[in-house]
C-alpha cells in the first residue's frame, strides 16, 4: 500500500502559511473581488492562499494556531474544494472549523485514488478532531492448525511465528472460540497445550469422552492413519469445503458398512450427523456460498453507529459495531464513506476483503474507493447497494443491529452521566433530576397528537411518558397545539413532579407559548419556574445544526455534535418526536375503516382470508415475520415481503 511518506516524496508538496501576504493594489478587479471573501477568524488570509492552489487532485491538511492538524481531506480539484470552505454562506459546523484555521498544507497527487489513500493515511497519523476517527488497532484472531507429527488446532492471536496453517482472520475472538468448541465435537483433534501433549502417559478426560483421539499416547498404524484422516477433513472444513467433507464421511460410512465394520460405521455416522446438525443450526445462513460484508449505519441522539456483518461461505462468521465521530460536513453518506475508507484501506485487513460489500446507499466516491481497494489487495471488490434475496435479508439484519447498538449506547449510564453534566455546565444549572420534552405530530393538520417524554439522570423514564390528543384548534396550527398540551400538562403543578428543564421542539413561536403557559401556571402555584429551552431546527433541518434558545432571556447556544450536551438534547428531542409520531399513526390507523390488507397489491379476498385464518387474526398477521407469512398457502416470499412491509409501514 502506498504510504503517506511515499506520496509526499513522489508528488509536489506545497506548504502555505497564514503569513502569506498579497498587495491588493496590484490586483485585477476580479482578484479584488476574490479577496473580499471572508477571512478565517484565526487570521488566515483565505483569498491569498486560494490563488496559489492548483486545480489538481490531492490531499490537504488544516492546522490551528498551535500547529495541530484539525482536519484532513481530499479533493479531485483542490482549488474548488478548498474555496468552498470560505464562502459567505456555509454551515455552522464548517464555520467553526474555518475559525480555527491558522494555515493549510496540501499535497498534489497524480490521481484522486492516490489522494484518497493519502488522506486515509494522514487521518490515521494525525487523528484530527474534525474528522471521523475510527480507532481499531486490535490484531485479529485466527484458527491455527499446527504442522507437526500430530497436528493440533488452536486459537491464535498476534504474530504468526508458529509453523502451521492459519485460517482467518475472524472478526472477533468469540467467533473463533465458538468455532473451536464446534470443531471439537466433530473432529477429535487435540487442542491441548504442547507441554501437556509431550508429557502425558495416559489419555485425558477428553479422550475418554470421545472428543480427542489421544495422540499423546502410543498409537497403532491404523490409529495414526485415522488421526491423519481427521486432520485432512478438518483442513477441508476450515477451507470452507464442508460439502466435500460430508461426501467423504458418507463414503467412509458406506465402506465400513460394506466391510461389516459396523462399530466404525456407527462412529462415522455420528460424526456425519453432528456435522449436519451444526450446518442446520446456522440460524442465518444461505444456500448460496457467497463471501460478503454487509454494512449499515444508524444516526441518532448526536452519535452514530456503523454495524458490520462478516459473511463467509453464506454464513455469518461474526459482527461488530463501531461508533465513529460524526463528520463535520455531510450526513449519513459522508459518515459511511469516511468509515469505509478508514476501515478497509488498512494493511491488516487486506486478507479480510470479501468479494462483495453490501451498503445501504450508493456512495459518491464508490468507484474511487473500488480503485483504492484494488490497489491495496490486488483484486476487484464489488460494492452493491440495491440488493434482493439473501443480500437484502442480511442488509435488513445489519440495519436492525445498528439501530439496536445505537439505542444501547444512548442508554448506557456512563454516557448519560457525561451528557447531563455537560448540559448542566453549558446551561449553568445544577442537580438536574427531571427533564421533559414536548412535540407535535399530525398529517396536514389531521388527528394532531402531542407527546411528553421524561428523562432523568439515568436516561429515559418510559413509564412517565404521556400523549395528548389535540382537539378544538385550527388544523395545522402548531402554536395552538403547543399551547393546549402545555396547559393540560401543567394545569396542576405539583412540587414533586416539577421538571428542572422543559424542552420545546420548535422555534421562537413555540417558545412564546411555553413562556406564557408555564409563567402563569408556576406563578399561580407559587412553585419555582423550570428552565425552558427551545430546540430550533437548523438549515435544511440537518441534525447537528440546531440552536438552543432559553426562555425569557432568549440566549442562543450553537453547539456541535461533538458536544455531549447537544447529543443529550437531540436524544430527548428524537425520542419525543418518535413518541408523538407513533401516537399519531396509531390514532390515524384506528380512524381507517378498511383493513390494511385490502390495499396490498396481489392480496385479494381469498389470500386475505387465508392469512387471517392461518395466522389467527389481524394482530397475528402484524406480528408475523416474512418466514411465517411464507408458510401461508398461496403466499410467495415476494408477496410475504410486501405484506410485511405494508403492515409495518413507518
Image (cartoon, rainbow, N blue to C red):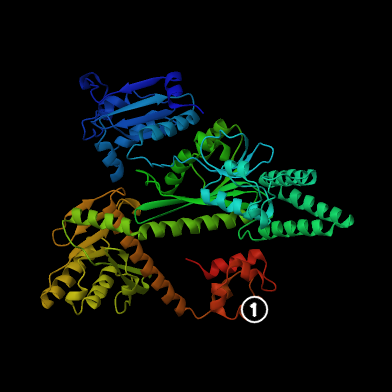
Residue 393 percent across, percent down from the top left = 59, 58
Q: Quadrant of residue 43?
A: top left
Q: Is 390 left or right of 69, judged from the image as shown?
A: right
Identified at 68% across, 48% down, the residue is 214
Q: Is 513 left or right of 213, judged from the image as shown?
A: left
Residue 291 percent across, percent down from the top left = 62, 46
Q: Secondary structure at mark 1?
A: helix
Between 206 and 540, the one lying in front of the other is 206
Can the viewer see residue 353 in this picture? no
Residue 14 percent across, percent down from the top left = 36, 21
Q: Is 41 left or right of 384, judged from the image as shown?
A: left
Identified at 48% across, 24% down, the residue is 110
Q: Quadrant of residue 216?
A: top right
> How many numbered callouts?
1
Residue 619 percent across, percent down from the top left = 53, 78
Q: Residues within 10 Å of mark 1 (few under 14, many from 20)?
A: some
Q: Is 162 left or right of 432, judged from the image as shown?
A: right
Between 386 and 404, the one lying in front of the other is 404
Identified at 38% across, 32% down, the residue is 125
Can the viewer see residue 85 in this picture? yes
Residue that mark 1 sits on = 614
Question: Compared to 49, does 554 lie above or below?
Answer: below
Between 95 and 619, the one lying in front of the other is 619
Question: Compared to 300, does 50 lie above or below?
Answer: above
Between 438 and 595, the one lying in front of the other is 438
Amino acid at each position: 500500500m502506498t504510504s503517506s511518506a511515499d506520496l509526499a516524496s513522489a508528488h509536489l508538496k506545497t506548504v502555505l502559511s497564514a503569513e502569506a501576504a498579497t498587495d491588493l493594489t496590484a490586483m485585477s478587479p476580479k482578484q479584488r473581488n476574490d479577496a473580499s471573501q471572508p477571512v478565517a477568524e484565526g487570521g488566515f488570509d483565505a483569498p491569498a492562499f486560494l490563488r496559489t492552489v492548483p486545480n489538481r487532485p490531492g490531499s490537504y491538511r488544516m492546522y490551528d494556531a498551535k500547529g495541530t492538524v484539525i482536519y484532513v481531506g481530499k479533493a479531485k480539484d483542490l482549488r474548488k474544494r478548498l474555496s468552498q470552505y470560505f464562502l459567505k454562506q456555509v454551515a455552522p459546523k464548517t464555520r467553526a472549523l474555518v475559525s480555527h484555521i491558522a494555515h493549510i498544507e496540501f499535497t498534489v497527487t497524480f490521481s484522486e485514488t492516490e489522494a484518497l489513500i493519502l488522506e486515509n493515511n494522514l487521518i490515521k497519523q494525525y487523528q484530527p478532531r474534525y474528522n471521523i476517527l475510527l480507532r481499531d488497532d486490535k490484531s485479529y484472531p485466527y484458527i491455527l492448525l499446527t504442522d507437526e507429527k500430530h497436528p493440533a488446532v488452536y486459537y491464535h492471536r498476534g504474530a504468526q511465528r508458529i509453523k502451521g496453517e492459519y485460517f482467518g482472520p475472524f472478526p472477533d475472538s468469540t467467533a473463533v472460540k465458538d468455532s473451536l468448541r464446534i470443531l471439537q465435537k466433530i473432529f477429535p483433534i487435540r487442542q491441548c497445550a504442547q507441554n501437556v501433549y509431550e508429557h502425558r502417559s495416559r489419555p485425558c478426560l477428553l479422550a475418554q469422552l470421545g472428543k480427542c483421539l489421544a495422540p499423546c499416547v502410543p498409537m497403532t498404524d491404523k490409529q495414526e492413519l485415522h488421526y491423519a484422516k481427521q486432520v485432512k477433513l478438518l483442513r477441508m472444513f476450515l477451507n470452507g469445503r464442508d460439502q466435500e467433507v460430508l461426501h467423504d464421511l458418507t463414503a467412509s460410512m458406506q465402506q465400513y458398512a460394506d466391510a461389516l465394520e459396523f462399530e466404525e460405521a456407527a462412529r462415522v455416522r455420528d460424526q456425519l450427523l453432528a456435522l449436519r446438525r451444526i450446518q442446520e443450526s446456522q440460524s442465518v445462513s444461505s444456500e448460496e456460498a457467497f463471501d460478503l460484508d454487509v454494512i449499515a449505519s444508524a444516526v441518532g441522539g448526536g452519535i452514530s453507529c456503523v454495524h458490520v456483518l462478516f459473511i463467509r461461505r453464506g454464513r455469518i462468521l461474526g459482527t461488530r459495531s463501531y461508533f465513529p465521530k460524526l463528520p463535520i460536513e455531510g450526513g449519513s453518506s459522508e459518515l459511511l464513506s469516511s468509515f469505509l475508507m478508514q476501515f478497509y484501506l488498512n494493511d491488516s485487513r487486506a486478507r479480510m476483503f470479501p468479494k462483495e460489500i453490501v451498503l445501504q446507499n450508493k456512495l459518491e466516491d464508490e468507484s474511487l474507493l473500488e480503485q483504492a481497494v484494488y490497489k491495496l489487495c490486488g483484486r476487484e471488490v464489488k460494492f452493491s447497494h440495491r440488493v434482493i434475496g439473501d443480500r437484502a435479508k442480511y442488509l435488513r439484519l445489519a440495519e436492525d443491529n445498528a439501530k439496536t447498538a445505537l439505542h444501547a449506547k444512548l442508554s448506557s449510564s456512563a454516557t448519560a452521566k457525561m451528557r447531563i453534566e455537560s448540559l448542566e455546565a453549558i446551561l449553568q444549572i445544577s442537580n438536574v433530576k427531571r427533564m421533559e420534552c414536548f412535540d407535535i405530530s399530525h398529517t396536514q393538520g389531521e388527528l394532531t397528537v402531542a407527546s411528553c417524554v421524561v428523562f432523568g439522570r439515568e436516561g429515559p423514564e418510559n413509564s412517565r411518558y404521556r400523549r395528548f390528543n389535540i382537539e378544538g384548534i385550527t388544523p395545522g396550527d402548531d402554536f395552538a397545539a403547543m399551547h393546549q398540551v402545555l396547559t393540560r400538562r401543567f394545569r396542576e403543578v405539583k412540587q414533586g413532579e416539577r421538571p428542572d428543564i422543559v424542552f420545546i421542539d420548535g422555534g421562537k413561536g413555540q417558545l412564546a407559548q411555553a413562556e406564557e403557559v408555564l409563567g402563569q401556571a408556576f406563578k399561580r402555584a407559587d412553585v419555582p419556574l423550570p428552565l425552558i429551552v427551545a430546540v430550533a431546527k437548523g438549515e435544511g433541518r440537518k441534525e447537528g445544526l440546531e440552536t438552543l434558545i432559553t426562555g425569557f432571556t432568549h440566549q442562543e447556544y450553537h453547539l456541535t455534535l461533538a458536544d455531549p450536551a447537544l447529543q443529550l438534547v437531540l436524544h430527548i428531542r428524537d425520542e419525543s418526536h418518535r413518541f408523538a409520531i407513533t401516537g399519531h399513526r396509531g390514532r390515524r390507523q384506528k380512524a381507517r375503516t378498511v383493513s390494511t390488507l385490502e390495499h396490498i397489491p396481489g392480496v385479494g379476498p381469498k389470500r386475505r382470508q387465508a392469512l387471517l385464518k392461518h395466522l389467527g387474526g389481524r394482530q397475528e398477521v402484524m406480528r408475523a415475520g416474512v418466514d411465517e407469512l411464507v408458510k401461508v398457502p398461496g403466499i410467495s416470499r415476494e408477496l410475504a415481503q410486501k405484506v410485511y412491509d405494508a403492515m409495518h409501514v413507518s
